[in-house]
Image: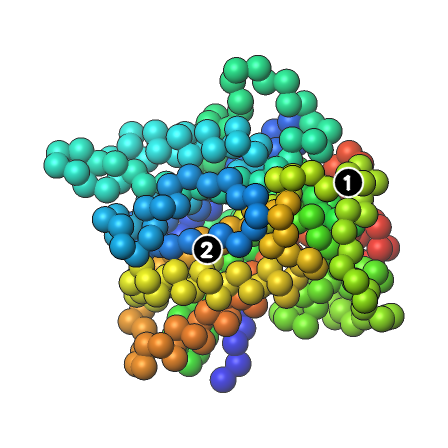
Amino acid sequence: MTIRPGPRNSITDIAGILVGQAEDLAVRSGVTVLLPEMRCAAAVDVRGGAPGTRDTDALDPTCLVEAIDAVVLSGGSVHGLEAASGVVAWLAAHGRGHPVGSVRVPIVPAAILFDLTNGGDKGWGDTPPYRALALAACDAAGTEVRQGNAGAGTGAKTATCKGGLGTASAFDPETGVTIGALVAANPVGAVTMPDGTFWAWPWEQEREFGGPHRPTGPAEPEPVLFRHPASPQPEPGGNTTIGIVAVDAALTKAEAQRLAIMAQDGLARAIRPVHTPMDGDTIFALATGAVKLPEPRSVALARIGAIAADCVARAIACGVWHAETLGPHTAWREKYGKP
């Protein structure tokens, strides 16, 4: 049985999953919000050495909260954590959240990437734009997902070219589960071989990032690091790839955590090196619960986890392929002269 992308090749191929985005091109930063129509079981896996997150401890399977209301990916480094406050306010105003007595408390985990030195206007004083961007993203939520210089990927970069926001999906006929990924790629490492071939090329589906790709020369024997002329030296905490995988399967929080752990392997398939001391690589996993996971559950979970890792790798390449040149950060298509 063949695994193929969903109709949109997007995380929104999972019923009930919406995505909203907003960005400020003058600031060269933005916010991406995954806004499910239902509360979802969720977990997280953090592998980078310089993460910036909010409410990730609540996702531990031993903790009280069984479901979340949204997930936020944001630029802006620590300032971008303010975006989650905007989403909390939006959800509360719409009567959504974890029930506590007569009130609702929205649960909104978040992760941020570092784009403060990409040349945009960061002179916002005591009013960072991320709360307002998050509110705009919530209002814009829908099934269409803009890629490249969009949302949290607006100001992203990689070691060799412009980074960006990407998405991909797959339907697994064996389990009946749809899997999707949404990733903002801003790694200190490279997403390409020296000839411009994406490291993720073996997993491409239906020319989603301009394929077919095949290396035209040998792969680099050593990791490519810090090659971008605008950032010749590594900055501690100055990068990070953050993302979300979602499935329509019914998973426990512990199973969702295993899904997040397996999905992190997608970063290693698409970025070299990855999970460095300078990255804050973080992957969230969500499960809407619409599809019963077939028995044996462990085998089915292993299968969808492997597919999720492929989707993450594909989403990273899609985000970079769709990105456009911004300031000193050259787009992949311009740099490598490919369609």
The residue under label 2 is which amino acid type?
Asp
Q: Secondary structure at mark 1?
A: loop
Residue 41, disc: none
Q: Is residue 24 above or below residue 171?
A: above
Q: Is residue 169 left or right of residue 188?
A: left
Q: Residue at x 78, y 72 (%)?
A: 214
Q: Residue at x 77, y 40 (%)?
A: 233
Q: Quadrant of the C terminus?
A: bottom right
Marks 1 and 2: CB-CB under 8 Å? no
Q: x%, y% of residue 192? A: 75, 59
Q: Residue at x 76, y 59 (%)?
A: 223
Q: Is residue 75 left or right of residue 327?
A: left
Between label 1 and label 2, give the one nearer the viewer: 1
Residue 226 or 95: which is nearer the viewer?
226
Q: x%, y% of residue 46? A: 49, 52
Give the Cα distance between marks 1 and 2: 27 Å
Q: Earlier in the sequence, mark 1 or mark 2?
A: 2
Q: x%, y% of residue 247? A: 40, 63
Residue topped by disc 2:
45
User: Alpha-carbon neighbours of circle 1 within 10 Å: few (<14), some, or many (≥20)?
Assistant: few
The residue under label 1 is which amino acid type?
Gln
Asked whether the viewer can see residue 13, the reply is no
Residue topped by disc 1:
233
Residue 192 or 150: which is nearer the viewer?
192
Asked whether the viewer can see residue 56, the reply is yes
